Image: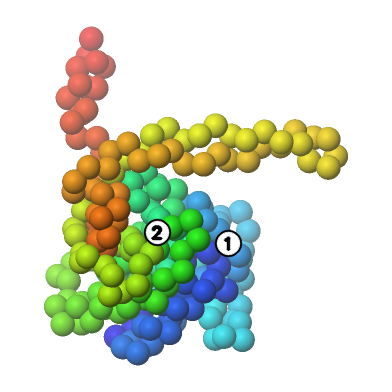
């Protein structure tokens, strides 16, 4: 099995290294990741300048672009064959609920999905998570499941793993995305030149975190797996908007 690995924390990330080490046990892997941390890059492509592909001493390839750039470049130009899976991670922190809109980790997997490849985003939940081995083992188990029972069509899965030793996990739940409250305000500051600057504020706390959501599953010690789709159409509002336009 051939797997393309990427992330949004950069090619030097310990989460990516743990993932590559574990998956190399069961598959041929190629790593193409950003040259620096691109967290929050979402599904952005670099169109205003050329991209450069370099290889690190570790054997990992890195690109001076976004996570989406990395997967797009690899699948459409670098690799001789289309990979059997695209896996993105292991992210330092959660990608649940509204986070998925901004997440570079999810974006890398999404690009694989859009290119027709079954894709998985893997995140380890916590402010300073440490149990990367746990998340890597779970990713390997997902790969082994795909080997035994291949998907009939491309799928995009978002997996969030509690920051616990593997033996302490409560199991796995298939979930829906929860929702967060509105984000905190930007943080005003002044740089050494006396100029006003702004830092993006923290994300909001979970608002919809009831049973069945990714938030709830992880809080209970379960691994959360959420199938994602790309269609942003708000189907329930089509009729209302049509009537509004006809008034």
**Would residue 48 be seen by someone viewing this image from the given angle?**
yes
**Would residue 85 be seen by someone viewing this image from the given angle?**
no
**In front of the other: 106 or 70:** 106
Q: Residue at x 78, y 41 (%)?
A: 191
**In front of the other: 30 or 26:** 26
Which quadrant of the view contains residue 75? bottom left
> Residue most toward the top?
247
Considering only vertical position in the picture, is 57 above or below 46?
below
Q: Quadrant of the N terminus?
A: bottom left
Q: Residues within 10 Å of mark 1 (few under 14, many from 20)?
A: some
> Residue 100, percent across and down?
38, 50
Is disc 2 placed on a helix, strand or loop? Answer: strand
Rendered image: mark on residue 125: 2
The number of callouts visible is 2
Rendered image: mark on residue 61: none
User: CA–CA distance between discs 2 and 1?
Assistant: 18 Å
Side of 117 where 14 appears, left or right? right
**In front of the other: 123 or 117:** 123
Is disc 1 placed on a helix, strand or loop? Answer: loop
Q: Quadrant of the C terminus?
A: top left
Q: Which residue is mark 1?
A: 37
> Residue 64, percent across and down?
61, 66
Q: Residue at x 35, y 67 (%)?
A: 164
């Amino acid at each position: 099995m051939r797997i393309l690995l990427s992330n949004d924390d950069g090619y030097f990330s310990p989460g990516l290294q743990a993932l590559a080490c574990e998956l190399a046990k069961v598959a041929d892997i190629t790593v193409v990741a950003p040259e620096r941390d691109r967290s929050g890059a979402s599904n952005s492509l670099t169109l205003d300048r050329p991209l450069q592909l370099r290889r690190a001493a570790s054997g990992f390839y890195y690109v001076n672009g976004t996570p989406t750039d990395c997967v797009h470049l690899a699948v459409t130009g670098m690799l001789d064959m289309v990979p059997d899976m695209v896996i993105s991670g292991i992210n330092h922190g959660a990608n649940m609920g509204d986070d998925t809109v901004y997440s570079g980790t999810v974006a890398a997997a999404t690009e694989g999905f859009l290119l027709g490849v079954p894709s998985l985003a893997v995140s380890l939940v916590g402010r300073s998570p440490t149990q990367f081995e746990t998340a890597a083992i779970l990713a390997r188990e997902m790969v082994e499941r795909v080997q035994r029972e291949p998907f009939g069509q491309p799928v995009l899965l978002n997996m969030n793993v509690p920051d616990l030793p593997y033996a302490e996990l409560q199991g796995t739940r298939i979930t829906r995305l929860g929702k967060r409250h509105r984000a905190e305000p930007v943080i005003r500051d002044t740089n050494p030149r006396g100029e006003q600057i702004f830092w993006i504020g923290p994300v909001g706390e979970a608002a919809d975190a009831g049973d069945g959501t990714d938030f709830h599953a992880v809080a209970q010690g379960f691994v959360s797996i959420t199938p994602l789709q790309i269609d942003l159409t708000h189907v329930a509002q089509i009729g209302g908007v049509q009537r509004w336009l006809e008034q």
